[in-house]
Image (spheres, rainbow, N blue to C red):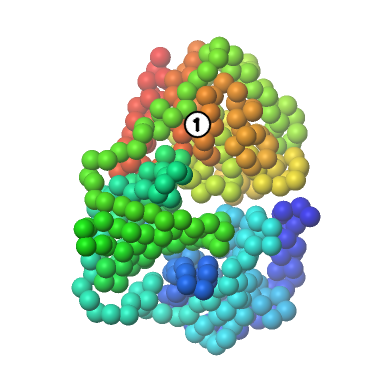
Amino acid sequence: MKLLLPLFIALFTGFCALSQKIPVLKKGRWVGCLELSADDHLFFELELHRKDNTYSFTVLNGKEKVPMNRPYVEKDSIHIFFTNFNSELVFRVKNKNSVEGKWVNHLKTNYSIPFWASLSNSSIFPVADTESPADFSGKWKAVFSPGEKAFDAIGVFDQKGNSLTGTFLTETGDYRFLSGNTEGQQMYLSGFDGSHAFLFKGKLTADGTIDGRFLSGKHYKTNWQAERNEVFELRHPDSLTRLVGDPNDLSLQFKHLDGTTFSYPNDQLNGKVVIIQILGTWCGNCMDETAYFKELHKKYNEKGLEIISVGYELGEDFDDFARHLSNYKKRFDLKHTIVVGGSANKSSAKNDFGFLSDFTSFPTSIFIDRSGKVVRIHTGFSGPSTGKYYTDYKEKTEQLIELLINE
């Protein structure tokens, strides 16, 4: 079955069922919960708005607001699809203050997680004691999966009282907006955007380090450790992937969304500054980078900048891939060129971009000057949740674009 079929069926059914009345729910701040396991519960904030018997729901991850489509009733359940990803919350109303159901991610096969939510003004994660909270604010050097598969990360946290926000940066991207709270020596952070369900738990030990656990949905879990370190940095994202082979042989061939052939280089791009973005519409970091590239395109396109996004998608065939990318282009009102790469795996991208030394991350972006020379290969993306890392990247990128345009 096509991956998008559940979405089309749901949207069609929802359209037909709009006349069915949604049971009364109280508007305001709700706290939702995903039961990842018997011992691990991912809590997150929900905003419920109601006007003239019309409901709207928004998931909150700190400063991020995750949009959701209009809810509809099918049989005895309410369905709400996430706007940016092919997943939904399906639930029944227990009473006007609480609901119970599941989160269904249609991007994975038979993937659902129990969900419930209730009207609440309490901390996101339950707090059982009145002990003064430990201070987790600041910058931490973190190691995930200690041992043979270990990888470094940077934790940046902001704490006000027992409220906690922040993120983790890795060499392939960041974990986007996380929010939660502390309880004594414990910290809890979560991020839920409809595609990813991240839960970070940590305890401040006697020696001032954090001993933690990380879960991604119900399919992945590992340990992590961290220590305060204001000067630690990851390897620079411009140093992780390099050009190999003949630097003049950057020949690429893909298909436009309508199935016609796209080739690089081509006459329309001669003498232009070009960014080739390798992305997937299922990827949150790619979505953040695309939002920034949209700004770049608007600001510099008339001065000679062109952006080519090559999408690697979940699905069974070209039609699935093109449909995902077409919806993405329409949803974010993108004006630059978007072409179909193939299926959503790193080996597909590596095969297509044989002039790269390796392919380790969606997104990866290639910056090319007016003469056709590659001047930067940027692996991963540190988005708005990373604060200074994001603003520094934007500043340096725009300096580079200005330089290349004026050459």
In the visual, does 274 lie left or right of 344? left
| Nearer to us in this view, 153 or 138 | 153
The quadrant of the image that shows the C terminus is top left
* Above or below 202: residue 183: below
Q: Position of residue 185 (x, y in %)?
A: 27, 68
* Above or below 117: residue 341: above
Q: Position of residue 318 (x, y in %)?
A: 75, 40
Kindly identify the residue that appears in the image at 27 percent across and 62 percent down: 204
In the visual, does 291 lie left or right of 258? left
In the visual, does 29 lie left or right of 182? right
Q: Position of residue 91 (x, y in %)?
A: 61, 76
| Nearer to us in this view, 144 or 385 | 144
Kindly identify the residue that appears in the image at 55 percent across and 80 percent down: 99
SS class, disc 1? strand
Give the amino acid type for the residue marked by disc 1 in the picture: Ser
The quadrant of the image that shows the N terminus is bottom right
* Above or below 361: residue 26: below
Whether residue 131 is visible to the viewer of this picture, yes or no, is: yes
| Residue ID for mark 1 | 365
In the visual, does 355 lie left or right of 327? left
Quarter location, residue 165 = bottom left
Kindly identify the residue that appears in the image at 35 percent across and 27 percent down: 399
